[in-house]
């Protein structure tokens, strides 16, 4: 059985005002066009490919299956991994006409839940970068191009079709900083030096935005109110967000040194933040939040209305 639906009425997100004219002139930017419709011109070609490739596809599938289930991992781990791998064969993931990856946070029988390859949700997915690394790298390219503006502010939900989006909501601290670590991971997996050279200036711009927004006092910790995967803003340093911060600093230091870029300021922040994390954010048993609402640049949380708009700043 095959299906072939080359056109849809699926679109999500808000296109940047400066890009809207281009969208109006290009049908590929107006509605989602599946990747297979770019590869096959009709359903007969899909069916022919399946018939001619069946033996090879079956062989590779069996090879993967046997290798996976013959693992020495505990049965509970194998079961958990297998259950989650099925997401990659579900409508939770899409691939648009040019091959770029786009995802929901999840899906029901006839709807997608929370659009846009949400960065602070897909932070934790590790199967795609190791099984299909080129697809994963396309997520990075969306994050640091269409989803990032000149100041380094990064939107954590991508439009569908993928296009430059508006910047009228918080960045997600874990999503944006996690993306920097994922750039490092994806570079190590691919070994593609040209890819990392091309992306590095925008990665640096992203991290500098994070520093200026959440660590303006250059203490090495995330302390200004920061939006995150809990869909709220944390006030004051947390072990959660600061760990992402230190990981991103470590990633850019490693990449920067390889590219012979200046990274001294990042190394100073990493050293200071590591000390703060291990002394003030660790209670001897687990990492904590040091709640702060005074002596910050942001206004008092009792009066600040931050959801859906910028957090008011003190004069």
Image: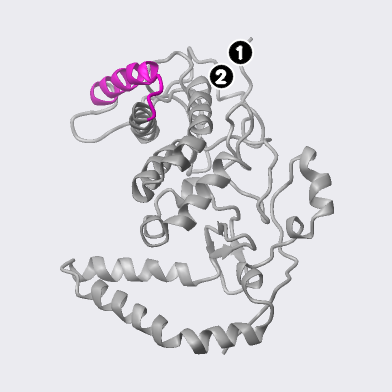
- 261 drawn magenta: yes
Q: In front here: 3 or 199?
A: 199
Residue 78: x percent and y percent? 25, 69
Marks 2 and 1, Cα distance to the nearest angstrom?
6 Å
- Looking at the rendered structure, which numbered label has been put on residue 314? 1
Q: Name the secondary structure under disc 2.
A: loop
- In percent of the image, x 53 and y 25: which residue is there? 209
265 displayed left or right of 303: left
- 85 drawn magenta: no
178 relative to 300, above or below: below
42 relative to 39, above or below: below
182 displayed left or right of 40: left
Q: Give the range drawn in magenta.
A: 259-279
The extreme top residue here reads 315
- Mark 2 nearby-residue class (10 Å; few <14, some 14–19, many ≥20): some
- Looking at the rendered structure, which numbered label has been put on residue 171? none
- In percent of the image, x 47 and y 27: which residue is there? 235
- Looking at the rendered structure, which numbered label has been put on residue 298? 2
Position of the C terminus, as image quadrant, is top right
- In percent of the image, x 48 and y 12: which residue is there? 295
**Is there a contact, CB below 8 Å, between mark 2 and mark 1?**
yes
């Amino acid at each position: 059985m095959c299906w072939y639906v080359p056109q849809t009425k699926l679109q999500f997100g808000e296109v940047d005002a400066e890009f809207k004219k281009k969208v109006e002139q290009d049908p590929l930017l107006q509605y989602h066009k599946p990747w297979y419709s770019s590869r096959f011109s009709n359903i007969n070609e899909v069916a022919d490919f399946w018939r001619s490739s069946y033996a090879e596809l079956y062989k590779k599938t069996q090879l993967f299956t046997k290798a996976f289930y013959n693992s020495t991992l505990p049965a509970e781990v194998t079961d958990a991994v297998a259950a989650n791998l099925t997401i990659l064969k579900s409508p939770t993931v899409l691939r648009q006409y040019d091959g770029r990856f786009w995802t929901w946070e999840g899906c029901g029988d006839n709807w997608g839940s929370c659009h846009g390859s949400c960065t602070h949700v897909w932070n934790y997915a590790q199967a795609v970068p190791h099984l299909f690394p080129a697809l994963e790298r396309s997520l990075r390219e969306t994050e640091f191009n269409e989803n990032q503006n000149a100041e380094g502010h990064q939107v954590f939900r991508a439009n569908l079709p993928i296009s430059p989006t508006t910047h009228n909501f918080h960045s997600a601290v874990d999503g944006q900083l996690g993306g920097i670590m994922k750039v490092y991971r994806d570079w190590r997996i691919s070994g593609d030096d040209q890819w990392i050279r091309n992306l590095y200036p925008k990665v640096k711009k992203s991290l500098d935005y994070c520093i200026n927004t959440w660590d303006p006092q250059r203490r090495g910790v995330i302390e200004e109110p920061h939006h995150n995967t809990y869909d709220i803003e944390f006030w004051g340093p947390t072990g959660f967000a600061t760990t992402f911060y230190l990981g991103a600093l470590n990633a850019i230091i490693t990449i920067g040194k390889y590219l012979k870029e200046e990274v001294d300021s990042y190394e100073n922040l990493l050293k200071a933040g590591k000390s703060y994390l291990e002394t003030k954010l660790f209670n001897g048993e687990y990492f904590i939040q040091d709640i702060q609402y005074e002596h910050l640049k942001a206004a008092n949380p009792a009066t600040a209305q931050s959801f859906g708009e910028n957090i008011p700043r003190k004069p």
